[in-house]
Amino acid sequence: MYLYCYARSEKARITGQRLLKEAEGEWIDDMESFVSAFGTNNRRADGTVVLILHQEACIKLLLERLYPADVRCPVINITPDGKYAGILRTGGYNTYQILNRLTDILGCTALSGEEDLKDTAPDLMRTVMAYQMKPDDEELLKKISAYIKDGGAVDVYSDLPLEMSEPVLDSLSYKTFLFQSNQKNELGQAYAAANSEDKYSIFITCGRIPEVEKNGKVLLLVPRIIVAGIELSARSDPEYASSTCRDALLKHGINPDAVVTVAVSALARESDAVTRIAQDLGCFVTFFDSRLLKAVRVPLNMGFSNERAEADFCTAAACLASDNGRILMRRAGSKNSVLITAAMKRSPVLLTD
């Protein structure tokens, strides 16, 4: 713990001197100069900014000086008389330990504690249920959910668009690391790195994650937000059609557990092959009238013939069922048995509500 103390009044400086007698640190003589030099002048990695000012002045400095300059360290407010102290900005897992140390030195009252984070903690289980997410470890899901409810913070990694209803408050519980859809390797590397650390992390993806030695603290969640459009030939063996669909998904880096529905034409809905595919994927079947499917203007690549466009029932069904979502793979599988198009629903995953 290294303190950067800032004060204006004589009373506040006396309070700061009491701190610096017991803890290592220095005075900030000029906030603007301090901010401009932060990070380039051998600033301590364990540094904490201590603003010994009335609360309005502290908030103004935080919003107009420290945040714009991206000064990444804890910021603690202490009243000039040294009677009260509170956290304005956390900067790591030990911010409350620093606050407790300062209150011990001054004998003052802490305005907040780690238990207060429970009041703003989101419910992970509600998110899991809303998107029918499949966890790779049910017991770990319960542990992490309870940890968050108790005020804990976790890192969240995803290659999906994530949104939070109250980002300012929810970021106290979730620190998000987002990847582009084409950064599968980078997400896999992050997954391997997280399993080498001793802290809770959550990975939310519909893609395949590499096999690594797990540390028991990294949770994988697969949201069910992918639609599989299916097109069958006249005779499709149910078992073969099902394995063909699953293999096609895996080949294109899609986790079969992410499929929420199988979309087909009305004529194909009673097919044994469609029933077997839906059972294997653990989802239900959505069907559309053939005339509606023919009317869909599916996105085409250059060189596709009109005949292929009209016959592309699997892509049309996937587009309809996913509300014109992003196509992940198109007409994969076997022309003699089953063809599959996978599309991801457009709406982002709402991490908190």
Image (tube, grey):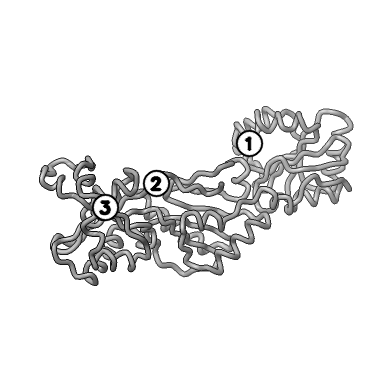
Disc 3 residue type? Met
Which label sits on residue 117? none
Sequence-first tag of 1 and 2? 1
Report the residue marked by disc 3: 329
User: What is the spatial separation of the Cα atoms under label 1 and label 2, in whole angstroms?
Assistant: 31 Å
156 or 30, which lies in front? 156
User: What is the spatial separation of the Cα atoms under label 3 and label 2, in whole angstroms?
Assistant: 17 Å
Which label sits on residue 38? 1
In the rendered image, residue 217, in percent from the top left (x then y), is placed at 55, 65
Disc 2 residue type? Gln
User: What is the spatial separation of the Cα atoms under label 1 and label 3, in whole angstroms?
Assistant: 48 Å
Badge 1: residue crowd in 10 Å (few <14, some 14–19, many ≥20): some
Q: Which residue: 24% across, 66% down?
A: 273
Q: Secondary structure at mark 3?
A: strand
Q: Locate residue 43 relative to residue 108 in the image: left or right.
A: left
Which label sits on residue 180? 2
